[in-house]
Image (spheres, helix red, strand yellow):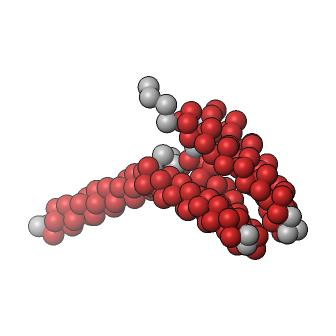
Amino acid sequence: MAKTPNTLVAVACGIAFGVFFLWFGQFALQRVREHDANPRRAGVKNQLMRRKATAMDDVLHAIIRGNLAQVNAATVRMKQSASKIDGFLSTDVYTQHGEDFYRAIEDLLVASGANDRDGSKEAILRLEKSCIECHFLLNQPK
């Protein structure tokens, strides 16, 4: 008879631990999903923006040297970084200037791919302008 209460206690503890671990697993999974769904992680956003800025520097240095193949390669990198960062910056300002940015990126890819120096130069100037205007508005004192 002494075994029956011990068995019941062991089963009850097992069930309680099982329920706790199931609840904890669901809680942890929910937190992970929330973390993934919330792209407002400053570290990631800043890293992607630095990659985009580095690619812009590479574009400017390559155009000055007259190397349109390097302009094209850096523009591809900039477009990749920009497409990754879009989900992190869904503000009206970013969306408005993002259209100009992507138009300039596409024009620069076409011009540099066709070895069109004047078209590349004009597209870079529009690209640079779109970046400056957007960052100027985003970084205004509040």
Q: Residue at x 22, y 65 (%)?
A: 10
Which of 7 and 124 lies nearest the eye of the viewer? 124
Position of residue 37 measured from the top left corner of the image (x, y, whole percent): 53, 49
Which of 58 and 75 lies nearest the eye of the viewer? 58
Question: Image height check: is 107 above or below 129?
Answer: below
Q: Determine whether, in the image, residue 3 is placed left or right of residue 32.
A: left
Q: Hey, which quadrant is residue 119 in on the image?
A: bottom right
Which of 1 and 117 lies nearest the eye of the viewer? 117
Q: Residue at x 47, y 53 (%)?
A: 46
Q: Determine whether, in the image, residue 78 is placed left or right of residue 39.
A: right
Quarter the N terminus occupies: bottom left
Q: Hey, which quadrant is residue 67 in on the image?
A: bottom right
Q: Is residue 36 visible?
A: no
Q: Is residue 139 visible?
A: yes
Q: Residue at x 73, y 54 (%)?
A: 124
Position of residue 142 measured from the top left corner of the image (x, y, whole percent): 44, 25
Of all residues, the one furthest to the left in this rendering is: 2
Of all residues, the one furthest to the top in this rendering is: 142
Position of residue 33 measured from the top left corner of the image (x, y, whole percent): 50, 53
Q: Residue at x 88, y 68 (%)?
A: 114
Position of residue 116 measured from the top left corner of the image (x, y, whole percent): 86, 64
The total of numbered circles placed on residues is 0
